[in-house]
Image (cartoon, helix red, strand yellow):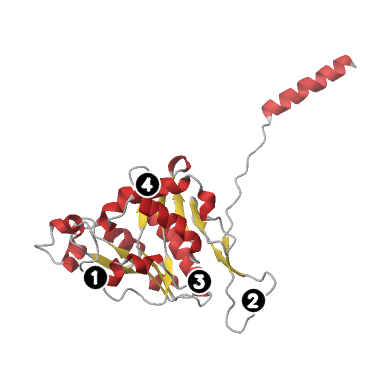
Amino acid sequence: MANKASTTSENLIFLSRAAPLKIVTPTRNPIEFMDQRPKPGEILSGGHFHQIKVALEKGIVMYGSKSDRLPQVQEMASERRTVAEVMFKRIGAYYGKSFEDFLSDIEGRKEFATPFFVAYGRMGWPTGAVFPIRKNHLPRDSAELASEAYWAAEDPDGKCLVFRKLVSDTDWTPGLGKKLISGGILPLGRALSSQGELEGVFAYVFPHNYGAFSSKVNIDDYLADMGDKNYLLHSSIGAKLGRVFENACNHISQTGGILFEMDYSHLLC
């Protein structure tokens, strides 16, 4: 009996070394964005939700408001500070905002109906983010576009999905800006559009280095001919140039005060 037990034990050890457990990575299923607003003619009752499926790219997490079943802002914990640091580093000067301002912006998203996206890059760090809101109208002029009041409130049933703050720590994880749009913003836009809830998606972008050329080249020629990397990020995805707004952005020496509109609406079909 002793020998049999010993042999059985040895066989178990041999099998555990020769045939380790195979780890299978599951395929990522679409995220079900639980929209609780009833459609026309429907009555909201008893835990009824509209399931809107959004197929996000790997490494992107969609964070929602307290009214839906997505991960919440509060669940980001210390990650909020990392995202705020990236925002301050990348766009603080352009909007005249401090680290504390950006941290407050992130924490305030819990009151918004529209989800936002965080991209996780190398070693799982949250090194990219984009913050869309829904509006029932696009910015009418430079003053409204530059106003924080426009971006601090939303119209949850608005037909336009707009975003201004798109950040990624390109020194740490290149390519997250494009990924946030193609793998986050556009899937959400298409899902909402397919439900008849959205008519357009628009980005508001500052030029990377127009300030150095603003006295010699007009903005249209600059964007068409000078290879501005911020413009190319959006145009490479397929967005079309819309309106140009003067005196809508800080950091004049680099931006020339310009913000321009990139239209993604035709990509929702």
Residue 85: image tag: 4
Residue positioned most to the top: 3
What residue is pinned by disc 3? Answer: 192
The residue type indicated by label 4 comes to Glu
Q: Whole-percent x and y of residue 195? A: 53, 75
Mark 1 lies on residue: 244
Residue 147: image location, x then y, percent: 31, 67
Check contact, mark 1 vs mark 2: CB within 8 A: no
SS for dot 3: helix
Q: CA distance from mark 1 to mark 2?
A: 42 Å
* Quadrant (top left, top right, bottom left, bottom right) of the N terminus: top right
Q: Residue furthest bottom?
A: 41
Q: Is the Cβ of the residue at disc 3 closer than 8 Å to that at disc 4? A: no
Q: Residues within 10 Å of mark 4 (few under 14, many from 20)?
A: some
Label 1 Cα neighbours within 10 Å, binned few <14 / some 14-19 / many ≥20: some
Three-letter residue code for mark 2:
Leu
Say which element carries label 2: loop
Of the numbered discs 1 and 4, the one sitting upstream in the chain is: 4
Choose the circle earlier in sequence order: 4 or 2: 2
Q: Secondary structure at mark 1?
A: strand
Q: Residues within 10 Å of mark 2 (few under 14, many from 20)?
A: few
- Mark 3, Cα crowd under 10 Å, few <14 / some 14-19 / many 20+, is many
Q: CA distance from mark 3 to mark 2?
A: 18 Å
Which residue position is annotated with label 2? 44
Q: Whole-percent x and y of residue 35? A: 57, 69
Residue situated furthest left in the rendering: 216
Q: Residue 134's quadrant in the figure?
A: bottom left
Secondary structure type for disc 4:
helix
Residue 224 visible from this viewpoint: yes
At horizontal 45% and vertical 43% (from top left) the residue drawn is: 125
Q: Is residue 48 above or below residue 23?
A: below
